[in-house]
């Protein structure tokens, strides 16, 4: 496990809010450190301008030696699926959710999108965006069948490709989810 200082977490938070939240922590730290002299001027380019400015203001306060009380926001990569990987003991799901290699930022949503679109390219010109796959995958592993159908269309090639891709990137989570759903009693 790598340990970071409070200052480094502020730099990570700034880079996250700028739009670099898919990068490894060292890349985020380096980016913010390289732009220390111009962070305020970059606010209009940030994905989350208000959160970005809040992070920059917190950094500036800390540089002046003032207490800040700023909460750096960090998000896990598919935390629900990470827990399912642990519970199922599935190394494939664990790898694809970033639990195995700390030097690689795994993105199960992008991987599932790539596989879905690869399967679709064999049969059609249709491709699905990552955001759609992310919404379908998250809700799929909460047991939803309705949301993936609403996103891709009932009985569509895209829905079928999505389910094949989900099984490929998270086989242990699929098995665990099916076990849990089969144990559910409506009463």
Image (cartoon, rainbow, N blue to C red):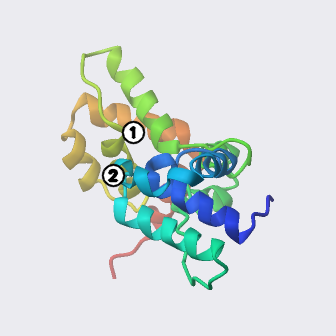
Asked whether 29 or 80 is in front, the reply is 29
In the rendered image, residue 133, in percent from the top left (x then y), is placed at: 36, 43
Residue on which disc 1 sits = 163
For residue 103, above or below residue 10: above
Q: Nearer the viewer, mark 1 or mark 2?
A: 2
Q: Is residue 146 left or right of residue 25?
A: left
* Residue depicted at x 24% and y 55%: 146
State the SS at label 1. helix
For residue 33, above or below residue 185: above
Q: Earlier in the sequence, mark 1 or mark 2?
A: 2
Of the 4 image quadrants, the one containing the C terminus is bottom left
Q: In which quadrant of the rendered view does residue 40 lie? A: bottom left
In the rendered image, residue 182, in percent from the top left (x then y), is placed at: 45, 62
Asked whether 114 or 2 is in front, the reply is 2
* Residue depicted at x 54% and y 73%: 58
Query: Is the residue marked by circle 1 packed among few (<14), some (14-19), or many (20+) residues within 10 Å?
Result: some
State the SS at label 2. helix
Residue 146 visible in this rendered orientation of the protein: yes
Tag shown at residue 44: 2
In the rendered image, residue 151, in percent from the top left (x then y), is placed at: 23, 45
Q: In which quadrant of the rendered view does residue 129 lie? A: top left
Q: Is residue 24 left or right of residue 180?
A: right
Query: Is the residue marked by circle 2 packed among few (<14), some (14-19), or many (20+) residues within 10 Å?
Result: few
Asked whether 106 or 90 is in front, the reply is 106
For residue 120, above or below residue 10: above
* Residue depicted at x 29% and y 26%: 127
Alpha-carbon span between mark 1 and mark 2: 39 Å
């Amino acid at each position: 496990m790598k340990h970071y200082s409070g200052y480094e977490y502020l730099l990570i938070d700034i880079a996250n809010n700028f739009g670099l939240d898919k990068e490894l922590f060292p890349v985020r730290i380096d980016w913010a450190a390289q732009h220390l002299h111009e962070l305020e001027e970059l606010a209009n380019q940030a994905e989350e301008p208000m959160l970005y400015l809040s992070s920059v203001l917190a950094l500036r306060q800390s540089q002046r030696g003032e207490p800040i009380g700023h909460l750096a926001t960090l998000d896990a990569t598919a935390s629900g699926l990470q827990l399912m990987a642990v519970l199922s003991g599935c190394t494939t799901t664990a790898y694809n959710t970033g639990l195995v290699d700390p030097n690689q930022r795994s993105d199960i949503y992008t991987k599932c999108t790539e596989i879905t679109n690869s399967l679709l390219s064999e049969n059609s010109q249709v491709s699905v965006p990552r955001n759609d796959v992310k919404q379908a995958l998250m809700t799929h592993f909460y047991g939803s069948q309705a949301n993936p159908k609403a996103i891709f269309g009932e009985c569509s090639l895209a829905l079928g490709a999505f389910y094949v891709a989900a099984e490929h990137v998270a086989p242990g989570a699929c098995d665990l989810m099916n076990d849990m759903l089969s144990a559910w009693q409506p009463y």
